[in-house]
Image (cartoon, rainbow, N blue to C red):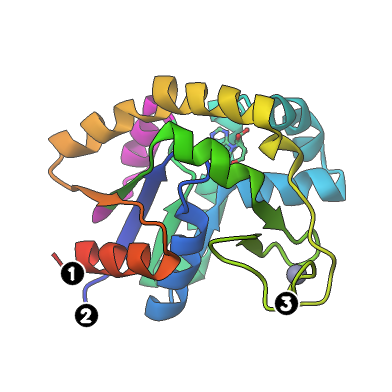
Amino acid sequence: MSRKIKLILLGAPGAGKGTQAEIISEKFGIPAISTGAIIREAIASGTDMGKSAKSYIESGALVPDSVVIGIIKDRLAESDCDAGFILDGFPRTVPQAEALDEMGVEITDVISIEVPDEKIVARMSGRRVCKKCGSTFHIEYNPSKNGDNCVCGEPLTIRSDDAPEVVLDRLRVYHDQTEPLKDFYSKKGILKTVIGQEKLEDTTALTLAALEK
Ligand code: ADP
Ligand code: ZN
């Protein structure tokens, strides 16, 4: 495929956007940009942005639009995005999507990965992350080759916002604020839907097929 891909991955928290983003990133040699990862790094390194975002993330709420729009504007201005990019976790609200339009960013594809809420709650309890290199795993669906440790050797941890009570809040936020983006992009004629599968490689096959359509 030679066309330039400017892809948005939509989906509930834990639907597998991040994993698909990494796979597509490697296959096509374009950066995967996760606003969640950028914010978590800022929290870990104690920047002003991190300090102001911390309480939102921990309660499962969205970080204010102005903050994430600023993050994306800066990131998309970097030269590696000239070849195309994948947005994982942005936009999450209609104003964020409108901001992309206002920046003149021409998205080529939007893929919504659909997973029912019941499955999301079960999946999140098995999610493990590496604080050192940022890799994510699932104890059942995508285990680390090193068991309880990351492929980089660091012990894996559970993200604080993956606690079951916070997950329910994040799902509510997803349905209220992010799901309307399906309509937004469907009207533009660029929305594709992928049903999230039990097996990671099955979801990947569907995602790649959606990009070829
Ligand atoms: P997940 O996709 O599993 O929810 P993310 O890493 O994408 O995980 O997001 C984690 C948290 O980071 C969100 O719950 C929210 O607080 C914050 N966040 C990430 N991206 C955005 C965004 N585009 N707008 C507002 N908040 C965001
Ligand atoms: Zn690691």
Left or right? Give the position of 179 relative to 184: right
At 65% across and 44% down in the image, what residue appears? Answer: 125
Please tell me which residue lies in front, 166 or 42: 166
Q: Which residue is under mark 1?
A: 212
The quadrant of the picture occupied by the N terminus is bottom left
Indicate the position of residue 37 as horizontal and vertical percent values. Answer: 65, 51
The quadrant of the picture occupied by the C terminus is bottom left
On the question of residue 71 being in view, the answer is no
Left or right? Give the position of 33 relative to 154: left
Does the segment drawn in magenta span residue 35?
Answer: no
Q: Is residue 94 above or below residue 195?
A: above
Task: Identify the magenta region.
Answer: 93-109
Identify the amino acid type marked 3: Val
Q: Which mark is residue 151?
A: 3
The secondary element bearing badge 3 is classed as loop
Q: Which residue is under mark 2?
A: 1
Indicate the position of residue 132 as horizontal and vertical percent values. Answer: 80, 64
Within 8 Å: ligand 2 and the Cβ of disc 3? yes
Q: Is tag 2's residue or tag 1's residue first in the polypeptide sequence?
A: 2
Q: Is tag 3's residue or tag 1's residue first in the polypeptide sequence?
A: 3
